Image: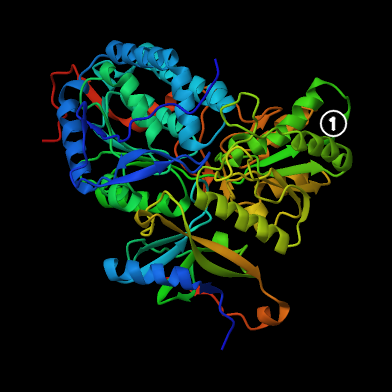
Amino acid sequence: MAFQRPEFKEQYENYIGGKWLAPIGGQYFDNTSPIDAGFIARIPQSTAKDIDLAVEKAWEAATTWSKSSPAERSMLMFRIADRIEENIELLSMVETCDNGKGIRETLGADLPLVIDQFRYFGGCIRTEAGSVTNIDADTVSMEVHEPLGVVAQIIPWNFPLLMAAWKIAPALATGNCIVIKPAEQTPVSLLVLMEVIGDLLPPGVLNVVNGFGVECGKPLASHPDVKKVAFTGETSTGRLIMQYAAENIIPATTELGGKSPNIFFESIMDKDDEFLDKAIEGLVLFALNQGQVCTCPSRALIQESIYDKFMAKCLVRIEAITRGDPYELSTMMSAQASNDQHEKIMSYIDIGKQEGAELLTGGNAYKNPQYPDGYYIEPTVFKGHNKMRIFQEEIFGPVLAVTTFKDEDEALEIANDTQFGLGSGLWSRDMHQVHKVSRGIQAGRVWVNSYHIYPAGASFGGYKNSGIGRENHAMMLNGYRHTKNVLISYNKNKLGFF
Amino acid sequence: MPVERVSVTEAAAEVIDRLRSEHGELMFHLSGGCCDGSSPMCFPLGEFRLGGRDLYLGDIHGCGFYMHADQFNYYENCHTIVDVVEGRGASFSLEIPLGLRFLIRSRIFTDAEMADVRPVTAAT
């Protein structure tokens, strides 16, 4: 099948209580595609009133949904997964248009992972068993799980559908009702998803409200009737989310990004085989999704004994990255998600040059001949040292900062010299080294001899300033429910205190 | 007069004036991390709770500019210029509904400037 820009409606509405509702204030904003800066559709510019309505409808739905059986919820998750799978090409094209990422990635990674996320949590909730403890001969303790009720979720723009799935799936599986706000840069794919799956869901269980952070996100995050907030984004907003959660005494989970090290030990060059080929790709994965990944391996640490030879091979691979039409499966790099993102990345490329980092390749905006108005940047590699800002701040673009190290100790010192701790990678043929170094890295995910794979069931979350909580794993079920202890005494005799 | 650590472009100052007329006094906090991180966030004064590890770098167009000490480690030798571009950022920053986004541009201080640069102070 040939892929192309899909057809959209001129205008979308909020999805509240199972219905498409216009924003109460009647305002809309234009959503554009970063591929060509062209208009996609008008999107509701919602306010606190829309949030109030969505939370109210979610609570109405919660009276029955919170009592639904695990079998019922599990089946819903499987049906959602099947429906998405039937529409995978449409949703991939929509995501490509909305976010700017290539169809190669939406069809090959984003959407398959969305489908798998629903199946994973559908399986988890059906097979889970509770716990009962015999405290003594007359006393039994039962740990019973109950949903929180209505939860708020705020989704980033870098993987709009996948990050929505990571949050929706565990919340639905545990019997919660959801009010979710997609990012204002990429609102339309979740709306198209609701057109695809809306009829499967009881009305009010999943509500989508669109709008800007300050007008719509803040009223959602600070709403007194919301029982948990889940957020993926950056640190200032993460702190605000936790501040509002503190005011309402509710839990918040936050995933706030990283500056992930990708460590290449000298043994990778012992042979010129398929594993070396894989390691080269492992470095070049900084360009996946144009670098707009929270775990982007944006710092490459290369053992100095192999630096020249290994980097030469990597640069050949980077310069072979194909660019062109994001709707072509062969196009490897596409557009940055927005104009301001494009500008910010270019400002960091400027900082790297000013700081004296050595530019190894790239360093410029890329004029896509087919889409001259889109937001494209060349894959860019700097060599420098870890105290430079391009090594310490998440640029969130296709900009790799490379440095060298002498030995394991120095590799770990550089890897951990960062305020973040989300992703990391290490490449080695030495299994002792692999175990030692993977335990020494202060990050929530260490990829060993791999990078950028996100199978459901492998937990994901941060150390240090990268946030609080773990997603993509059954342990997130407890992030969306209460644990009630029912402590039962069979003994008819009093305690004896009174 | 010490060398200032933060300044603002004329275009950004105009946006600050627009926002101030609607929201009252304002503050800036530099964000870190993914998505819209590494960008300045503009909030109504007092909306964002400054903590013991936030630093005050100076005023821009009448608004305090703050960042976390962990981040300042890498800004010590940089002059930070708050600018504004067209774009649709996420986050709770006040200018976003205008279709604009504050961003920072940077310039490395000269040795002479570093000798006389404004000292940072605790935010709280």
Q: Residue at x 29, y 14 (%)?
A: A70
Kindly identify the residue that appears in the image at 46 percent across and 76 percent down: B59
Q: Quadrant of residue A175?
A: top left
Locate the C terminus of chain A and report the quarter of the image it occupies: top left
| Residue A165 visible to an observer of this rendering | yes
Q: How is the image coloured?
A: rainbow
Question: Residue, x 52% and y 54% (percent of image)?
Answer: B32
**Chain of the residue under label 1:** A
User: Is residue A259 shown left or right of residue A78?
Assistant: right
The three-letter code of the residue at mark 1 reads Ser
Q: Residues within 10 Å of mark 1 (few under 14, many from 20)?
A: some
Single out the residue that lies furthest toward the left. Answer: A498
Identify the element where label 1 is drawn.
helix
Residue A368 % position (x, y): 63, 41
| Left or right side of A214 for B14 | right
Which is nearer the eye, A442 or A187?
Answer: A187
> Who is closer to the viewer here, A15 or A72?
A15
Residue A384 falls in image quadrant: bottom right
Give coordinates of residue B35: x percent, y percent.
50, 46
Question: Image quadrant for the N terminus of chain A?
Answer: top right
Image: A63 above or below B23: above
Give the vertical position of A128 relative to A389 (above or below).
above
Q: Quadrant of residue B123?
A: bottom left
Q: Residue furthest bottom?
A: B1
Q: Position of residue A407 (x, y in %)?
A: 82, 43
Which residue is denoted by mark 1 in the rendering?
A267
Q: Which is more toward the observer, A338 or A328? A: A328
